Image: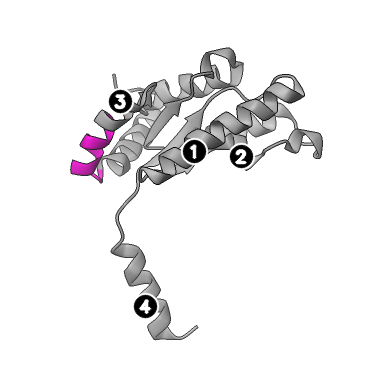
Amino acid sequence: MSQTKTHSIIESLTNTTIKPRLYLVGAYTGTPAQTRKNIATARKYAEKLWAQGYAVFCPHLNSSLMEETTEVNYQDFLDGYLEWIRCADVVYLLPNHKRSNGSLVEIELCKKLNIPLCKTMGELIEWKKGWDHIKDWGVLRRIFNRVTEWRGKRYE
């Protein structure tokens, strides 16, 4: 790749609008039919949120039905997704989140790291108004929470 082309790509990346990183939390496992329904529900929300300008991480789609084809166990997937939550600017709770032990663990981590939790589209719209005015807030929050984590404290 030429130096000019590389420079052009880097410049276009730095001039783009910063999208808030949104992580979806909701039930995944159940009967085979319920798992597929949960994946479909998460996909519907992910598509809608991408269209609204969020950079969505949907764990349901990331490892969709891998439990059927891999040796990776549930705890390994959950541990990996907890790492992705640390990168999120906001978390959206799917309507079925209360029926999931994994969701409850994810929510607890969000509370510990002060990551905003939104249960409705209205709450998410209100949160995004603040994001649109302070795009660096997510970066500052992550830095602050990482420092307080290192010190063993949490900002309330």
- Mark 2 neighbour density, 10 Å: few (under 14) some (14–19) many (20 or more): some
Marked residue nearer the N-terminal end (2 or 1): 1
Q: Which stretch did the figure color magenta?
A: 127-136
Report helix, strand or loop for mark 1. Answer: helix
Query: What numbered label is drawn on residue 72?
Result: none
Q: Position of residue 4 (x, y in %)?
A: 38, 84
Query: What numbered label is drawn on residue 7?
Result: 4
Q: Quote the CA–CA distance across marks 2 and 3.
A: 24 Å
Q: Quote the CA–CA distance across marks 2 and 1.
A: 9 Å
Q: Mark 2–mark 3 contact, CB under 8 Å?
A: no
Report helix, strand or loop for mark 2. Answer: helix
In magenta stretch: residue 123:
no
Marked residue nearer the N-terminal end (4 or 1): 4
Which residue type does callout 3 highlight?
Answer: Gly
Q: Viewed as shown, does residue 13 lie left or right of 63?
A: left
Which residue type does callout 2 highlight?
Answer: Leu
